[in-house]
Amino acid sequence: MHDDHAAEIRENGEIGNASGEAEIRKARWRAGVSILVNLFLAVGKGVAGVMGGSSALVGDAVHSATDVVGSSAAWFGLWLAGKKHPSFPYGLYKAETLATLLTSVVVILAGYEIGRQALLGPETIPDVAATLPVAVIALVITLTFGMYQLRAGRKLHSKALEADARDYLADAMSTSVVLLSLIGAYFGLSLDRWAAAAVAVFIFWSGGNLLWRALCDLLDEAIDRETERDIIELVNSHPRVDHVERILSRTAGGRFIVDLDVVVRSTSHNLAHRLAHLLESEIQENHPRVVMARIKTHSREPAEFSRLTPVSEPGGEITAHLGGAPWFLRETVDRHSGKVSGREYLRNPHRNASRKKGYLVGKWMLALKPDQLVVTEERKSTAIALLKEAGVRVIVAPETSPDNR
């Protein structure tokens, strides 16, 4: 492949990767901010709850602290997952899962203790002057940041941020219960212990969710169906792939490991081996959470193959200019007899492109999944480089009508 064309292919392929990495950095930055916000809320509510004698507000502080501990466990897992060890060839990604499992037990125990104190502890009326303003401020911050995280998650297509936003909205519900109990205390109603009991339920729910996620991860739960379908579509879009026969996947500390059996339209072992490596790289580039992709290829040569030819017009001669060809003839050819069983003319949609014409035409031709490309001469062009890299056979033919070949 010529260096200029290889560079153009890499440049176009890396645009999406750079964009994806930028979005991941933004998501990580927001996750870091989320930890700081939760820490601020936990400390503020905890101090006010202790000073004001509100068990409910102390419980709400613990609820916020569970998010801090959970997020910190995730960051610890990410740090440890980056370490390599020969005894763990599949990585240390489940270190995050173990941290989450331990966190869930602590959260459930904290919820139990708060609930026990709420049900068995003495009736008290908290100091409204010390606790009510803190509860109001905490509710405003929680709702505002929760909606901010939700919008950011949808914009960045980050399920982690959307889940974080839902945690904030659940935290807002917990704080709302505390706020109502403090308003009741302002009017002389002793609702603090019942509010603390309600907050304990929220804490139990958070701990239970953490425990469930950790157990699913430890039991090698499959990745979500949407991502699995996207990976299958990506692999099936390759011109030399006949179909994906099987996909096996599992989660590991929030990351994905996938194994695929792919049927390739070729009997060449070298092509199948090269194709497997190419597809493994593309899967990880398009899905950053996939940390390991393994493809096993199975060769199959179909009875018919697809052939593309650039032509000047329907029924016209082969044109020498691939990117500027007005039309392409697509033929279905019997592999054994060489007879053409079907043909259609396709207009080149990128003929008049002002920039990256060769790349655009090459990607368009790849989407047609040809087995062969007929040209008058094998020029060094981006389009030809793309097709050859994908395993498409390039055939040199004289400048005559395809009908006269």
Image (cartoon, rainbow, N blue to C red):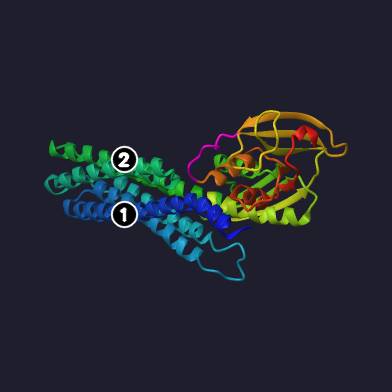
In this rendering, the count of numbered labels is 2
Q: Main secondary structure of the magenta part?
A: loop
Q: Amino acid at mark 1?
A: Val
Percent x, y of residue 146: 32, 43
Classed neighbour count for the residue bearing mark 2: other residues with Cα under 10 Å, few (<14), some (14–19), many (≥20): some
Q: Quadrant of residue 331?
A: top right
Q: Which residues are drawn in magenta?
A: 348-355
Percent x, y of residue 121: 27, 48
Q: Quadrant of residue 10?
A: bottom right
Classed neighbour count for the residue bearing mark 1: other residues with Cα under 10 Å, few (<14), some (14–19), many (≥20): few
| Identity of the residue furthest to the right in this view | 337
Percent x, y of residue 68: 35, 55
Percent x, y of residue 125: 17, 44
Residue pointed to by mark 1: 33
**SS state under label 2:** helix
**SS state under label 1:** helix
**Is any atom of residue 252 visible in this view?**
no
Q: Look at 44% across and 50% down and name the residue there.
A: 19
Residue pointed to by mark 2: 147
Residue 33 included in the magenta stretch of the image:
no
Query: Between marks 2 and 1, how big is the CA–CA gap?
Result: 14 Å
Q: Look at 59% across and 34% down and name the residue there.
A: 348
* Mark 2 / mark 1, whichever is N-terminal: 1
Residue 353 included in the magenta stretch of the image:
yes
Horizontal side, residue 156 vs residue 235: left or right? left
Query: In front here: 311 or 3?
Result: 311
Query: In front here: 41 or 114?
Result: 41
Horizontal side, residue 131 vs residue 370: left or right? left
Q: Amino acid at mark 2?
A: Met
Q: Look at 17% across and 37% down and name the residue there.
A: 183
Q: Quadrant of the C terminus?
A: top right
| Identity of the residue furthest to the left in this view | 129
